[in-house]
Image (cartoon, rainbow, N blue to C red):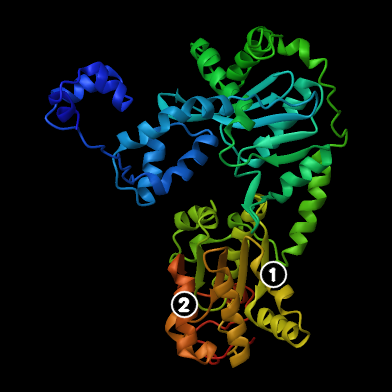
Amino acid sequence: MIHEMRKRGMNITQIAHELGRDRKTIRKWLKQSEPASYQRQVKRPSKLDPFKDYIRRRMEEGCLNANVIFDEIKAKGYSGRKTILRSFMQPLRPAAIAKATVRYETSPGYQAQVDWGRFRVDWNREPKRLYAFVMVLGYSRMMYVEFTEDEKLDTLIGCHLRAFAYFGGRPEVLLYDNMKTVVTDFDERGHAVWNERFARFAAHHGFLPRNCRPYRARTKGKVENGIGYVRKNFWPRVKTFTSLDDLNRQVRHWLDTVANIRVHGTTHEQPRQRLAQEGLKPINPIPFEEVDRHARKVSLDACHLPFHKTLDQFDFSFQPSIDERKIRELATLRFLEHRENLIFLGPPGVGKTHLAVAIALEAIKQRYTVYFTTAHDLVETLQQAHHNNTMRQKIKTFTKPNLLIIDEIGYRRMEDTAAHFFFQIISERYETGSIILTSNKTYGAWGEIFGDSVLATAILDRLLHHSTTINIKGESYRIKEKKKAGFFRPEGNSDKSESLI
């Protein structure tokens, strides 16, 4: 149209006035053979779109590493490139960083944070791992550090007591990050299930244990920063040490002369000076060992062990079919940590129950819960519970302990109902808790024990999936003792085939 107007003798100014356009626009159109059509931009869907809400949530939780998030969304089905992810995350980073670095401050005397740091050393020309127990008071940032050779519960409790003594008291709450010796499990709502002995220790001294929420790094940042500070500031100062006591003397000197008198970067005060404002509470003057000893005795009585015999009391020389090293390895209780089973097979009197009880005593020493029963008593108890409509409560008796010992399988044939009750216990504990079984029958004869080869196969399938079998072949200890006492006549006597028992 503008070309027609131009042919009629109209200049650019007249055409611009006529069409209500700028002269530059008219001049541009005149240079073109025809006006360019309007191109509407269509936004194409991105492969990242289904994962954007997840990415925003992870960034809000404090994860700003694109490589980590890329691996996570790739596992969820993302097939795009990492560069697309980086481009999406870039404008979101400032807000996420600001949120992640908000200080989680606590009032005086309220909270301390606890964690372990791990350090590699050369110990007598051998590589060795040491553990640094670190406790940091939330308000003052006062720090306690102690190096140990393990992270066991007794070690942890001892470190707590020495930290409280160093600080001059204890806070109201101690925060942990899923420490295995403190948190044993999580319930169906995700709440921590505390180690029973540690919970008694906390209650005895009056502090409340809390578990750090997942992906909330800033809530436990004080102790994590403390471990990093030990690693960067103290560890390079250690030129040599002659023993663990020597190393701990060095770290105590560092705490007193460096860590706790420096001007802290966040509080802008010395931790030692702010400690006076913490208002820590005194710990219980009654030693926890006295309370714990009574609780251990009650726990031992509750196990229903038929006797107390240790591995040192077992005569391995009398049973050469048993590999003592294997038994000692089982007594380290790694099978309990992996929820595996242990089965002792052999004729009566060869020491099956003795070995089961000895391993149970080791488990009790390591604070595992244990329950002992015979196969007959187990099914009889469940049958009575079934009759009284208390089955679910009674099943917990056999499923709750870390270790269940079922003795004397095969001494009596089980009726159909009893066999199914037995199967229910094995099924309930499958891959959730360890079992030690003793039996005088080979696995091939278990169909006779339960009166049903299909049921016996189902029981064995669950038991043997994660298990160790110890097959004992030898003479009975009881007959050995009877022989010593003269209750068996030696061969060559006229009555050599008859026992006096």
Q: Distance between the residues labelled 1 and 2?
A: 22 Å
Q: What residue is shown at x 78% (from left), y 55% (from top)?
A: 297
Secondary structure under badge 2? helix
Q: In this view, does 263 lie above or below 65?
A: above
Outermost residue to the front: 8
Image location (x, y in percent) of residue 188: 64, 59
Image location (x, y in percent) of residue 255: 65, 13
Q: Name the residue under label 1.
A: 396
What type is the residue that disc 1 sits on?
A: Lys
Count how many numbered circles sit on residues in the image: 2
Q: Nearer the viewer, residue 14 or 64?
A: 14
Q: What residue is shown at x 22% (from left), y 18% (from top)?
A: 12
Q: Which disc number belongs to residue 460?
A: 2
Q: Quadrant of the C terminus?
A: bottom right
Residue 264 position by quadrant? top right
Q: Earlier in the sequence, mark 1 or mark 2?
A: 1
Residue 496 visible in image: no
Residue 478 position by quadrant? bottom right
Is 326 situated left or right of 116 in this image? left
What type is the residue that disc 2 sits on?
A: Leu
Q: Which of 27 and 3 is in front in this view?
A: 3
Q: What residue is shown at x 55% (from left), y 61% (from top)?
A: 315
Q: In this view, does 95 lie above or below 455?
A: above
Q: Categorize mark 2 by other alpha carbons within 10 Å: few (<14), some (14-19), many (20+).
A: some
Q: Is residue 365 above or below residue 124?
A: below
